[in-house]
Amino acid sequence: MASAPRPERVPRLLAGCLPPYPPPPPTVGLLSMEQEETYLELYLDQCAAQDDLAPPRSPLFNPVAPYGMYILNASNLDTALNSNPEVKEASGDFSSVDLSFLPDEVTQENKDQPVISSRHETEENSESQSPQSRLPSLSEQDIGLGLNSSSLSNSHSQLHPGDTDSVQPSPEKPNSDSLSLASITPMTPMTPVSECCGIVPQLQNIVSTVNLACKLDLKKIALHAKNAEYNPKRFAAVIMRIREPRTTALIFSSGKMVCTGAKSEEQSRLAARKYARVVQKLGFPARFLDFKIQNMVGSCDVRFPIRLEGLVLTHQQFSSYEPELFPGLIYRMVKPRIVLLIFVSGKVVLTGAKERSEIYEAFENIYPILKGFKKA
Amino acid sequence: MPGRGRCPDCGSTELVEDSHYSQSQLVCSDCGCVVTEGVLTTTFSDEGNLRGLRRVRDLCRVLQLPPTFEDTAVAYYQQAYRHSGIRAARLQKKEVLVGCCVLITCRQHNWPLTMGAICTLLYADLDVFSSIYMQIVKLLGLDVPSLCLAELVKTYCSSFKLFQASPSVPAKYVEDKEKMLSRTLQLVELANETWLVTGRHPLPVITAATFLAWQSLQPADRLSCSLARFCKLANVDLPYPASSRLQELLAVLLRMAEQLAWLRVLRLDRRSVVKHIGDLLQHRHSLVRLAFRDGTAEVETRGKEPPAWGQGQREGEVGNNSLGLPQGKRPASPALLLPPCMLKPPKRICPAPPVSTVTGDENISDSEIEQYLRTPQEVRDFQRAQAARQAATSVPNPP
């Protein structure tokens, strides 16, 4: 890719609306590992300084991605202006940014090659994933801003069944609307509750996996660890539990581990590190590679009863409601790809997310639909 | 059959295609000479498919479904069979698949067949049926309409053995079918309107409604009969949730009765209200409107205020009642029209989770990790205990 364009080259209409993030470092391949690392830290430091607007989401502002891809795109700018769900938690710090690509072992003495290469891998993985993960979220941010009428945007979001490519170029009119409106929208940080009158889904469970990268003797682990249970006849893994954060881990003899029960991404990562430490203390050369959040579950309450029979009639292609089998309606949202369990009491469970923003997006999409069924 | 050649023996053209143990043969219908023998064309999977198709047809016939249903169900089965996941599935799964195809066909024609009924016929578990049903609907991308409640009421009510006197059914319990059907339908509609049906299995609601309808048509003689006894003499299984549905329905009827002046003075309870179900149903639309206020707005505002406020409001309403007329002379203030799960107070107040400041990169102290490890002494004790248990369990049986 060419040299990164400066922010001043942005069209005048939007000057001043774009957060003056520094240009990211050049793409990988041009630099050595150490240089890239320095650039990365520099970039992150600078971003942290300007983080009163919105904490950067790593897939979106991935420094390794070509800058041109996301600067000249109109809808992209909406994203920059838009509510970022993480603002609500902690502005100005990176608690919600996925820093899992930074290896645990950077702090330790042994900083060997395989560690760096795995980080490189995860960065490249997230780079290749970022265009796709970016595109769906962009049009959703349009909708979230409420610039389009909610019915129009809903039909938009539902008319693109999984075809992320078609989403971005096709809605020209909404983009132009959002463009002009974006110029007059004041640059105040928006809370994630733009339309949903203060209801924010709470995360209830995070499932993550990590590779300890060494073969484990499960019998030895079960013998030396107090908090482990191992019943090979029932299940071929050690079930270990720690008290803080209150989580459970399944540790397999291949060295792979699954960590469940945490209430936030950071807690899940901390818990996984603690389990890895326990395994290390038991004498195994455990590492902490490829930590990845596999699933996130959230829940919330819209506080009004919902006519599930009506909802399944109007949203037949996404809903499945079988009262003979399950009291809730199963809504499979296409964008973002989240499954929602909607109950008559107004309680909603959202699952299948890989990122917190997907849960918030899904709830913002479903709330206007549910409001339509408020009147019996 | 013309155009197929001639029999080499007798020269007739009457050749018939006949299968002998799934091997196709061309046989002369005059002299019986086998003209050609086809290869064994049916593979194991084909035979499985044929078996399944036969079962689909049999099931349709057992259920006495219209003939068009059979073809649709067979088509669904064949469509499902084209997927490799289904072809490689266990036999049990294929048998349940038969039921799923029939169920989908019935649903699309508004034929009220319940999953419970199919599971009973197939001797299948509802859990197994449920997983395969969801899988096949997703796989084939089908739009399956909901169970038609009105049709189910008609079919289910007709199955109650109460329309003719018999040794088990005394004369005073016999009821006219049409009257019972129409009243049951009205009660089920009322239940639907007052949030008793959404999210629940439909059948127990209908059982409760049928019971109330039957009781109310001749209350003097029938009030003494319980729900369980009613189902027994009608020769119908009593679903477990039916009694709680019955109580919910009676509560709704009592609230409606509070709005009628001549019923209010009677101070009805759950038994006596049955006598007036006829009147209540006659005016059900306006009574529901009077007796209940829209719960949706109320819950939202109530949710935002602390619970104490809600209490105060209710007390205020009671105070209003006592302002002018004595209680009992004025209609009760409208109750919230909400599903029963929202009317019950929450079992425990969920505290808002404390805001977590975990970053994921904190230092992990050694002592914290060591609390989870056994000391060498504990390891030795544990090993000894394990060995002892092993020895105990492997004691040979006495001869």
Image (cartoon, coloured by chain):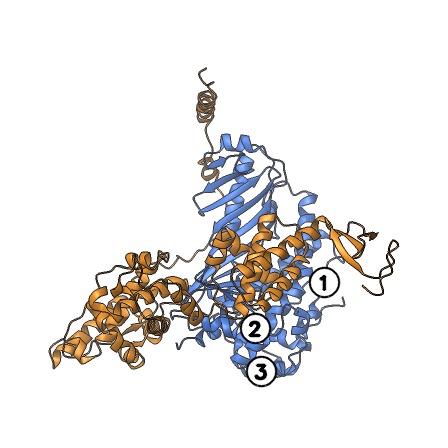
Chain colours: A blue, B orange
Q: Position of residue A338 (x, y in %)?
A: 55, 63
- Between A230 and B55, the residue placed more toward the observer is B55
Q: Residues within 10 Å of mark 2 (few under 14, many from 20)?
A: many
- Between B319 and A135, the residue placed more toward the observer is B319
Q: Helix or strand or loop: what does disc 2 sit on?
A: helix
Q: Is residue A187 above or below residue A100?
A: below
What is the number of the mark on residue B287?
none
The chain ID associated with circle 2 is A
Three-letter amino acid code at the position of disc 3:
Ser
Residue underneath mark 2 = A141
Three-letter amino acid code at the position of disc 1:
Pro
Mark 3–mark 1 distance (CA, rounded to whole Å): 29 Å
Mark 2–mark 3 distance (CA, rounded to whole Å): 16 Å
Tell me if A141 is positioned left or right of A39 in this view: left
Q: Position of residue B272 (x, y in %)?
A: 19, 68
Q: Residue at x 48, y 74 (%)?
A: A369
Residue underneath mark 1 = A26
The chain ID associated with circle 1 is A
Three-letter amino acid code at the position of disc 2:
Gln
Q: Residue at x 12, y 77 (%)?
A: B322
Earlier-in-chain disc, 3 versus 1: 1
